[in-house]
Image (tube, helix red, strand yellow):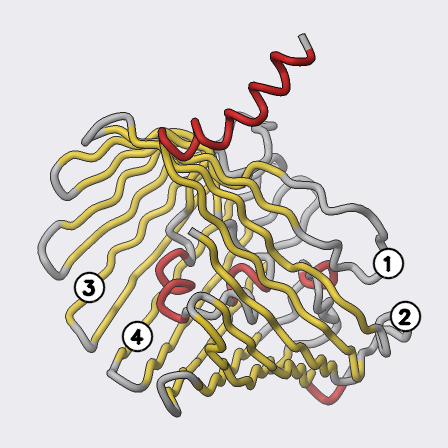
Amino acid sequence: MKRFIFLLLISLPSFLFSQGSISGYMFGDFYYVLSHHDTLVEGQNGFWARRIYFTYDYKFSENFFTRLRFEANSPGDFKTSSNLIPYVKDAYLGAKFSNHNAYFGISPTPTWEFIETFWGYRAVEKTPGDLYKIGSSRDFGIAFKGDITSFLSYHFLLGNGEGTKSEINKYKRGYLSILFKKEPLFLELYTDYGQGAKKEDVKVYQSFLGLKFEKAVFGFQYYNYDKGQGEGKERVRINVFSFFSNLNISKKITFLLRIDRMNEKNPFIGRVDYIPFSTENPFFFYIIGFDFKIANNINFIPNFEFVRYKDKKPKDTSILKLTIFYVWK
C-alpha cells in the first residue's frame, strides 16, 4: 500500500502536466507602517504574502475546459498569527462557442475583472470596489461572456451573491458589464443587483474610462454603491472616484500614480486587510510607486500608500511597501 501511494505521488505531477497546465503567481512585501490612527498598527513592520495563486487548467476538447485555482494569503489584520491556509478561488466548467464562453461554478464576476487587468498592478493594491469592501471578485453561478462585435463585448453572471462562500439564503445576484474597446479608448459600463440575507437591496453602478497609449495608461473610474435598509440595518450609500496613470520611463521602469476619493463614511473598511481604514470620515487615498522589471516575469515595485481623512480626523495613514511580484507558467 505504501509503495502504491509513493508511486502515485511521484507520477501525479507528470500526469497533471500531460493532461493540462499548471501556473500561478505570488506577490508580497516588506512593509513598514509609518503612521496610523491605531497605535497597535503604527510602527508595525515585517514580511507578508498578500496573494499566492496555484492554478490548474484542463481542456477536455476544443469546446470544453475547466479551471481549479487555490489562493493563500498572510493574515493582514496586524494581530492574527497563523499559517497560510489555501482556499478555492476558482472552480468552474467552461464551454466555448464561437466568440462566446459559458461558465458554471465559482468564476470571476465582471465587477472589476477588466479594470484590474487594465490597471495591471493588483500586486500593488486592490482596485477601489475590492479595496473598500463594496464588491466581490467571485461568485458561484452561471456566467456568459464574449464579443458582440469587434469593439463591443459583454460579461453577465447570475450567482448566489456570497462570493466564494456557501449559499445561506434564497436570494440571488445578477452582474452585467458592457465594454466598448477601440484603442486607445476603452469604456466599461457596469451594474449589479441583489438581495442579502437581511432582505436589503444592494445596487451598484460603475463606469470606467481607460486610455492606453504606447508609453502611458490612464484610467478614470466612478463607483456607486447603494445598500437599502434591511432588518435592523441602516441604508448605506457610497460614492468613489478613482484616477490612475502608468507612465513608462523606460523599457524596464514604470512610474505609478493612483488617487481615490471616498465621498462618504464607509462602515465596511475598518476590517480591510493590510491597510485598515477609519470609518470616521471620508478620505483621499494615494499610491505612488515605481515598477522595476528585474527579469522575465519578476517585478520589484517599491510603493508608498497614504490616506488623508477629511478635517485630518483621524490621523493620516502612511505605509511603505517593497513589493515583489513573480509569475510562473
Q: CA distance from mark 1 to mark 3?
A: 44 Å
Is residue 123 visible in the rendered image? The answer is yes
Q: Residue at x 51, y 49 (%)?
A: 136
Of 23 and 237, nearer the camera is: 23
Query: Quadrant of the image for the N terminus?
Result: top right
Compared to 183, does 206 lie above or below?
above
Sequence-wise, the earlier of marks 1 and 3 is: 1
How crowded pointer 1 is (Cα within 10 Å; few <14, some 14-19, many 20+) is rated as: few
Q: Dividing the picture into quarters, in which one does residue 310 lie?
A: bottom right
Please name the residue that numbered disc 4 is placed on: 210
Q: Which mark is in front, 1 or 3?
A: 1
Q: Residue at x 64, y 59 (%)?
A: 50
Sequence-wise, the earlier of marks 2 and 1 is: 2
Q: Which mark is residue 79?
A: 1
Sequence-wise, the earlier of marks 3 and 2 is: 2
Where residue 145 appears, x then y in whole percent? 25, 44
Q: Which mark is in front, 1 or 4?
A: 1
Sequence-wise, the earlier of marks 3 and 4 is: 3
**268 to the left or right of 298:** right
Sequence-wise, the earlier of marks 1 and 4 is: 1
Query: Is the C-beta separation of discs 2 and 1 under 8 Å?
Result: yes
Of 300 and 67, nearer the camera is: 300
Kindly state the secondary structure of the residue where label 2 is placed: loop
Kind of residue sitting beneath label 4: Gly
Q: Which mark is residue 180?
A: 3
Kind of residue sitting beneath label 2: Leu
Kind of residue sitting beneath label 3: Phe
